[in-house]
Image (tube, rainbow, N blue to C red):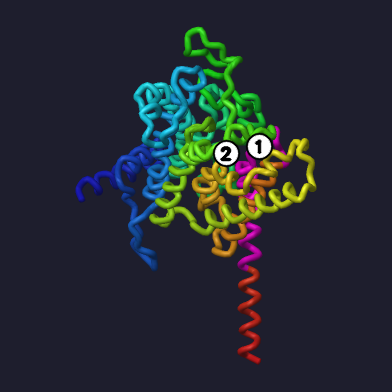
Amino acid sequence: MGLKNNLHNFREKNKDKKWLPAFSAIHTFLYLPNETTHNGTHIKAADDLKRTMNIVIMAMVPCLIFGMFNAGYQHHLAFGEIERVTSGFFSSTFWTMDNFTVGFWKILPLVVVSYGVGLAIEILFAMKNSHEVEEGYLVTGMLVPLIVPIDIPLWMLAVAVAFGVVIGKEVFGGTGMNILNPALTIRAFLFFAYPTWMSGDKVWVHGADPRVQDLANGATPDAISGETILGSLAQNNSSMIDSAGDIWNAFYGFIPGSVGETSTLLILLGGLFLIFTKVGSWRIMLSSVIGAIVMGLIFNGVADAGWISESSKFYGLMSTDFWMHLLVGGFAFGTVYMATDPVTASQTNKGKWIYGFLIGFISIMIRVFNPAYPEGVMLAILLMNVFAPTIDHYVVQGNVKRRMKRLKVKTA
């Protein structure tokens, strides 16, 4: 009690100081929030913004650790230093410290830059506007390193983070006021500002891009391909998933891709954890999957009916089995960790079903009709972020009209 009183006195004494929000942010991060409600009707609950953000981060930690192992594994595999994994999660080839060391030293700087630049900007805005530093960036700071290529230059990442935090969040008023998911805003900026670093068959494997210093002595990066399964299918080439083993590797995550997006298994477990803790919306997750399956089935029907030529640039992904779209690319990661963002998603239960369905539906549509960049979940989620308030508006208005009709019937 004495420590709490001393802290209160300290805040009161320095309430006009510009640096107080920075102090409060560090204190809140290290300790429990010390502000509680005293008057009026309020809801008593054990959760707060800090706990909610920490739960989401815990759900992403397995993807981060796996991504470190996979980054090293894909690097050594591309340079012919190890053999391809054939025994799934029990493979001794994959779970080696050598793989982890390579991945750790490549991914750690991405995490440091993401948090360092993002939190610095948040604190500066808090000090300028004299308001508290919210914990919203804790999740964004972890998401960003997981959705970018392994060799993205750190200065590009820093510029993108600055853009995403300022334009995608702070100009709207900070945490809880933004209409676009900040992490996806950062990725969209990278994609449109530096497209050659965000696409192609070499950016997904460390050392495979000729623009990055090669760590394998005597190797030739130009001769190495780090093509993803999604990229292969977009080129009408299904050789990367010819066997059941290839499909299981895609499910486990032993494939090239963004740092944290490859393992559908770990993403699924993370999604179940978010649902169990009531942090993530199961309605959005399930409806997104349903929307993707519906769109996939439509495309499969078009391809099977022969309405599109096999030589068409759309045929590869259009003829891909509908369920494969759930395993490859960033669809699973986007659905679980970004489509469910409570700030930018629909708030009504019916709205969540519509919102999620359209994300899945549009994701596969963009994926098929844009083979040059066969990943639609980023654009689909950002598009639906914009329409989420409109969806909720019409859902609420529909409920009001139905209740008004019932009221008229009762009073008639």
Main SS, magenta region, reads helix
User: How many numbered badges does the structure rendering display?
Assistant: 2
Task: Inspect the magenta stretch and tell me whether residue 403 lies in it.
Answer: no
240 or 287, which lies in front?
240
Span shown in magenta? 369-396
Mark 1, residue position:
374
Q: Position of residue 102 (x, y in %)?
A: 41, 21
Q: Residues within 10 Å of mark 2 (few under 14, many from 20)?
A: many
Label ID, residue 15:
none
Quarter of the image that includes the C terminus: bottom right
User: Contact (CB < 8 A) between labels 1 and 2?
Assistant: yes
Q: Is residue 154 left or right of residue 56?
A: right
Q: Is residue 112 left or right of residue 4?
A: right
Quadrant of residue 346 within the rendered picture: bottom right
Mark 2, residue position:
329
211 or 309, which lies in front?
309
